[in-house]
Image (cartoon, helix red, strand yellow):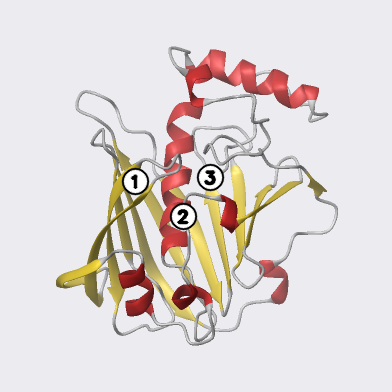
Amino acid sequence: MRTTSSRPRLSALTAAALLVASPALADWSADVVTKMKLEAGKKPPPDIQGKVYGRKGLMRMDAELPDMSGGSMSILFDFEKRTGTTLVHAHKVATERSLDDLPVKLPASCTSKTQSYDACFKEQGYRQVGTEQVNGHPSAVYEGTIPGATGVPTQQKLWRPTDLPEVPYVRARTTSPSGQVTEVNLTNIQQGKQPDSRFKVPAGYRKVAPPTTATGLPASVPAAFTAKDFEGKTPEQIQEMVRQRLGQQGLHVPQGTTPPPTP
C-alpha cells in the first residue's frame, strides 16, 4: 500500500474537478487517467484509472487505486448544494463535506445558471496563454496559481475544449512547490443521458463524519491526524496507524488493508 502517494494524487484530481466545476449543458462521460511525476530520484506511483460523469450542477469521479486493497472509490459533487461526497465502495461508507470548507473557493460564475467557463477561470486568477490541440480537441490553455489540498499555493494549467462546451477540461496539470507534477487527462468523451442513480449515494451506505479541517487526509481518519504524523513513517506503519484509527471508529478493517484516502 502507498498511502503517502495515493493521497496527493487524489487531492490533485479533486482540485482539478473543483476548480473548473460548473453546471454542464448536457450529460456526458469520459475516461480519466491521473499520472504523477515525483521529485527527482523518486519512483512515481501507478496511474489512477477511472471515469468522470457530468450533468448540469453535478459531477461524479470514479477511481481505481491499483496500489491499495479495495481501492475502488467515487466522489460525487453537487454544486447547487455545494457538497462533495466520497464513497468507499469496499466498506460501503459515504463521507459528505461542504465545498465551502475546502481551500478551493468557487465564485458564482462557476456554479450559477449564468455560468461562463471563461469568467469562472478569470475570477479564480487564471489567464489564457494560448491554444493547443489536446486529446483530440482544440483547447484554450489557461494558467493560474491556486491553493492546494492544504492551502499551499500550487501552479495549475488547464486545457478547456472549445468544441465541447459542457466539458470543463480535457487536461489539467498541477505542479506543487516541491516540483511534484500531477496530470489528469480526459479521453473518449461521450455525450448522452446518464442515469439519475449515477449521482446519488447508493442505498445501504453508512455515513461517516469528515474531519473538522480540510487537511487533505482521509475523510474517515479523524482530524487528530495531521500531515506531521505521517512524516518519517514507512507505508506499512502508516497503514497500521490508519487501520487502528478506523477500528476505533467502528470500521473493522482487516490487517494489511485500509480504505483509500479522500481529497
Of callouts 1 and 3, the N-terminal one: 1
For mark 1, does the 10 Å Cα neighbourhood hold few (<14), some (14 to 19), or many (20 or more) residues? many
Q: Which residue is mark 2?
A: 104
Label 3: which residue?
263
Whether pointer 1 and pointer 3 mark residues with C-beta atoms closer than 8 Å, the reply is: no
Q: Is residue 153 above or below residue 111?
A: above
In this picture, residue 224 sits left or right of residue 16: right
Would you identify the image quadrant in which residue 201 lies? bottom right
| Percent of width and height locating residue 17 | 46, 60
Kindly identify the residue that appears in the image at 44 percent across and 53 percent down: 15
SS state under label 2? loop
Residue 65 coordinates in the image, percent (x, y): 51, 41
Answer yes or no: is residue 1 visible: no
- Per the image, the residue denoted by label 1 is 35
Quarter residue 39 falls in: top left
The three-letter code of the residue at mark 3 reads Pro
